[in-house]
Amino acid sequence: MRCSCHVMLLRYSPILLFLIFISIISSNIKGETGPLTKKNVLIKPFNNTISAIFVFGDSTVDPGNNNCRATVTKSNFPPYGRDFVNHIPTGRFTNGRLVTDMMASYIGLKEFVPPYLDPILSLEELMTGVSFASGGSGLDPLTAQISGVIPLEQQLEYFKEYKIRVENEIGEEKTKLLISKAMFLISAGTNDFVINYFNTQLRRHSYTLPDYQQFLLQLTQQFLKDLMAEGARVIGIVGLPPMGCLPVVITMKTAGSPLQPRQCIDSYSDVGKEYNQLLQNMLKNMNTYGTKIIYADIYNPLYDMVQNPNKYGFNNVYSGCCGTGLFELALLCNPNSLVCINASEYIFWDAVHPTQATYYNLFNSLRPTVDVMLKL
């Protein structure tokens, strides 16, 4: 295994410390990750020139890179994966497929985007794309340290390693061509606010909220430049969701008021909304040297699901399907947890992560954006 863990002891909020403590002392969980299918490559259903898909970010796009990490932020055990192929808990933080899986299938590359750290990846799997993402990670390196997961800088290093591996098999020129025709995706930032800025004192000692937003934008811009330097020519970057609607955020903010009705915490969501606008402004003014960078909005479609659940077939909005749905995630959502019967009626699978049904709705909302990327 390529993974190694360097855990730093940091000052957590009391709630975050409680969750981690309970995770460590109450869980005796073994990962059950297994092979998905014998063949995970498709014939493209329509004309496009996308050669591969490469994914960077956090748990919204991590298909199992944390499986070999010494971290509580993992999900390679039931009930995760309950509605996945063969009911396999692959390490995806949901009951089924991720948006990136649906995108890869739609493009015609493969049914699932595998984790780069899967030790048995075939050359064919490597050449059609992998995910380097790590649940719990963020744009800020400190965010990954808090959870003991893979920071974006290391994800980029893994991509450089990936290029060498493929070059050794097909040669430098073919590898450059493959990279130049690939689609790159970045989904990160939520953990920087929810886990890091709002729940530890570390960054708040040095940054006001506007300053921290600018700090993350600078890190984003540098990461985009690094990807371009490695040959990326089509990059999609996902904005933040309405963070105040995450069940765990609602629980944290209403912990002292048990009679208060559960509803989105607008102050958190407004931070994400403001950040998304700043991100779009930055992208418009950024010199991309011919690389096409596309902003992908998930805030508005997810917020619409929360505000109009019946339109999407949901009847549970503010809690997850796993356990009480109020705070369980990762090791706290485990084989001993009570789980809802029909996850497609829930927006959230656990207290943070959407269900496969929600991801499917998000994918449908993003299809026009994907189509634009296919034509670039």
Image (cartoon, helix red, strand yellow):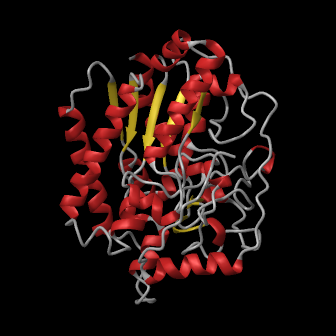
Q: Nearer the viewer, residue 333 or 128?
A: 128
Horizontal side of 204 relative to 75 (left or right) equals left
x and y percentages locating residue 219 in the rendered image:
30, 46
Q: Nearer the viewer, residue 345 or 269?
A: 269
The residue sitting at 28% across, 39% down in the picture is 221
Residue 18's place in the image compared with 179, above or below, is below
Residue 165 found in image quarter: top right
Horizontal side of 211 relative to 74 (left or right) equals left
Q: Nearer the viewer, residue 111 or 32?
A: 32
Residue 375 found in image quarter: top left
The residue sitting at 17% across, 33% down in the picture is 285
x and y percentages locating residue 45 in the rendered image:
62, 17
Horizontal side of 233 relative to 167 (left or right) equals left
The residue sitting at 48% across, 58% down in the picture is 309
Residue 119's place in the image compared with 349, above or below, is above
The residue sitting at 50% across, 58% down in the picture is 136
Residue 289 found in image quarter: top left
On-image quarter of the C terminus: top left
x and y percentages locating residue 20 in the rendered image:
57, 76
